């Protein structure tokens, strides 16, 4: 079978060259054959690097040179060496910038590109343009026999540039797409990892398990062998978790001033070498850490991760830093969830305990008020919190008498309720056994000896004799009760002494009144008189008295309800500021 025409021309050309003669027509034919080979090679299915290397060899063979290179432009102004033959040993792999204008072939001169010619040992530089932009540069060394690069050779190189422009541009686009696909694949892999880790983090309430999972994940993804987690604690940072590092003899706690320069400079994943010097950085350097990652979902660095160099020695990429930052934020959110869960459990436990305390306190109030012949009695207590420091009681005594008490402990909440339980027990034990003034002395001594110096109790205690309608009372620093007569006049009951439990040597004086038919006695705590309106005005004694006067003809229970309703309406949206307790006694 006869050889193709191109091969026949090539054999004829080789014979002329062996004989030392090369007619111009055959030379042009040789160049056309080389261009055809070049175009075929650039359009072949070889890999990008193989195509560029084969194309360079075709051009070098046509022009009979033994040294050449192909520099391809990167993302910026730099050019990287993509194919080469017989370059000097110290030839650079990359040129920061190479400004070329026009499509002229540049021959070796002392001009602005002298350093490039010298570094690569070249004689000519041929720019390859596409869309008005240099995308590559073809460089060739001296020709065989020291023949110069004439107009014919320069024209051939321009033809080479024209043929190579589109395939090289396509190759650049291909490489860019391949890099993008690789980065996209890495991102997808990272997202899948983060999704799986997120489910594990949110399903755990064990801080140590979360720290171990984060450290293991980060070490595996970045391929490092050392990792440390530092958490902010009162006064500084402490090493909460370390893996792959030798235990130091020094403390794992770094005071706040010693860590502040590094922490304040840390806003994203950063190399340790780029952070300011401080004792925390010195510790991380001793542990051979290389990358520091903040865990700061709210902008304040409350924790940080530090990892060592990669086992392979490769640098950390932008994708690595993004993954580490995202993982750090997830870990911090998980640790915060653990803290909030712990707070919630404590709150639930506290709520249960307060509910039990409220039930116990409510059980101290009389389940049903005892009856006194010829009198109507009503009482009510409303705590501002779950439990309070107010108390009332009605205790049946011998001979049909009735002891009435209403008290207010300083403070609010659980401490006040505990002290009030002691007052309740003491009153129940002493009522009717001593005269009211002596009973107050005994109770004052007990509270003075058993309570703190800043704790005290206000108490109004009275004993009612239904037969004589006489009421003997002692007011120990309590809000003076209101005695409303049938004609609408009023008087306050103030006889007694100071508050209980505050002073050791005190004296109490008992007072006595006689309640006629239709008269009213109302005892309240300061939760009524000191109730504040939204503009912080007190309800006051006048407010209580006015409410009692308007309702004095009603039953004791209705008088009480109207009083409580008036106080509630007065406070409105401001809500309560203290416990409210009231007792109403009406003579029938």
Image: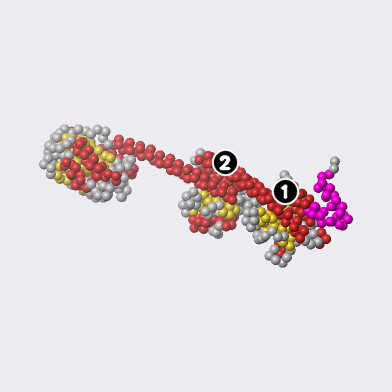
Within the magenta stretch, is there residue 15?
yes
The x and y percentages for residue 190 are 58, 44
Which residues fall within the magenta stretch? 3-31
Q: Is residue 213 left or right of residue 479?
A: right
The residue most toward the bottom is 110
The x and y percentages for residue 242 are 57, 48
Q: Which label belongs to residue 42?
A: 1
Looking at the image, tell me whether mark 2 or mark 1 is earlier in sequence order. Answer: 1
| Residue under the image location 14 percent in, 39 percent down | 519
The x and y percentages for residue 289 are 59, 53
The residue most toward the front is 25
Q: Nearer the viewer, residue 452 or 485?
A: 485
Q: Nearer the viewer, residue 464 or 19?
A: 19
- Name the quadrant containing residue 487: top left
Q: Secondary structure at mark 2?
A: helix
Of circles 2 and 1, the one toward us is 1
Within the magenta stretch, is there residue 482?
no
Q: Nearer the viewer, residue 271 or 401?
A: 271
Mark 1 closeness class: few <14, some 14–19, many ≥20 residues within 10 Å: many
Q: Is residue 295 left or right of residue 545?
A: right
Mark 2 closeness class: few <14, some 14–19, many ≥20 residues within 10 Å: few
Q: Which label belongs to residue 192?
A: 2
Q: Which label belongs to residue 588?
A: none
| Residue under the image location 84 percent in, 56 percent down | 22
The x and y percentages for residue 310 are 63, 50
| Residue under the image location 71 percent in, 54 percent down | 161
Q: Could you tell me how far apart the alpha carbons at marks 2 and 1 are, in whole angstroms?
A: 39 Å
Q: Main secondary structure of the magenta part?
A: helix
Q: Do we see residue 476 in this rendering?
A: no
- Name the quadrant containing residue 405: top left
């Amino acid at each position: 079978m006869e050889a193709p025409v191109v091969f026949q021309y090539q054999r004829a050309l080789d014979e002329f060259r062996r004989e030392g003669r090369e007619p111009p027509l055959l030379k042009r034919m040789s160049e056309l054959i080389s261009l055809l080979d070049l175009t075929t090679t650039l359009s072949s299915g070889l890999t990008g690097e193989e195509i560029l290397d084969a194309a360079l060899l075709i051009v070098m063979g046509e022009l009979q040179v033994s040294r050449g290179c192909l520099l391809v432009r990167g993302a910026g102004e730099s050019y990287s060496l993509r194919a080469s033959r017989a370059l000097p040993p110290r030839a650079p792999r990359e040129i920061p910038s190479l400004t070329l204008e026009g499509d002229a072939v540049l021959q070796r001169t002392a001009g602005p590109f002298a350093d490039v010619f010298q570094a690569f040992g070249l004689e000519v530089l041929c720019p390859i343009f596409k869309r008005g932009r240099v995308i590559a540069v073809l460089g060739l060394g001296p020709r065989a026999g020291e023949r110069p690069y004439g107009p014919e050779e320069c024209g051939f190189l321009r033809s080479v540039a024209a043929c190579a422009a589109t395939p090289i541009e396509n190759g650049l686009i291909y490489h860019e797409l391949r890099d993008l696909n690789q980065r996209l694949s890495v991102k997808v892999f990272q997202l899948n990892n983060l999704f799986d880790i997120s489910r594990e983090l949110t399903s755990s309430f064990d801080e140590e398990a979360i720290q171990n999972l984060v450290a293991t994940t980060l070490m595996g993804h970045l391929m490092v062998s050392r990792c440390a987690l530092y958490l902010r604690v009162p006064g500084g940072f402490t090493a909460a978790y370390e893996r792959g590092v030798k235990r130091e003899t020094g403390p794992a706690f770094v005071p706040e001033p010693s860590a502040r320069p590094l922490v304040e400079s840390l806003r994203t994943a950063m190399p340790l070498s780029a952070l300011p010097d401080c004792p925390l950085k010195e510790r991380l350097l001793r542990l051979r850490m290389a990358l520091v990652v903040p865990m700061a979902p709210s902008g304040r660095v409350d924790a940080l991760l530090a990892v060592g160099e990669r086992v392979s020695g490769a640098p950390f990429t932008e994708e690595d830093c993004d993954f580490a930052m995202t993982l750090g934020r997830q870990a911090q959110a998980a640790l915060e969830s653990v803290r909030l869960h712990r707070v919630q459990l404590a709150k639930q436990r506290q709520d249960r305990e307060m509910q039990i305390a409220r039930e116990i306190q409510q059980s101290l109030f009389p389940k049903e008020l005892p009856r006194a012949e010829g009198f109507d009695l009503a009482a009510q207590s409303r705590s501002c919190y779950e439990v309070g420091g107010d108390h009332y009681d009605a205790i049946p005594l011998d001979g049909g008498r009735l002891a009435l008490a209403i008290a207010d402990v300083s403070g609010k909440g659980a401490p006040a309720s505990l002290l009030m339980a002691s007052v309740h027990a003491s009153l129940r034990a002493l009522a009717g056994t001593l005269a009211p003034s002596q009973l107050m002395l005994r109770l004052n001594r007990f509270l003075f000896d058993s309570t703190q110096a800043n704790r005290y109790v206000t108490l109004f205690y009275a004993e009612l004799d239904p037969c004589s309608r006489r009421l003997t009372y002692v007011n120990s620093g309590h809000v003076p009760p209101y005695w409303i007569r049938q004609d609408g006049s009023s008087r306050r009951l103030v006889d007694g002494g100071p508050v209980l439990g505050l002073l050791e040597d005190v004296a109490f004086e008992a007072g006595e009144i006689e309640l006629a038919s239709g008269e009213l006695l109302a005892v309240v705590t300061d939760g009524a008189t000191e109730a504040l309106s939204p503009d912080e005005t007190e309800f006051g004694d006048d407010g209580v008295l006015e409410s009692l006067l308007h309702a004095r003809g009603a039953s004791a229970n209705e008088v009480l309800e109207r009083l409580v309703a008036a106080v509630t309406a007065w406070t409105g949206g401001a809500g309560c500021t203290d416990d409210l307790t009231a007792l109403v006694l009406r003579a029938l």
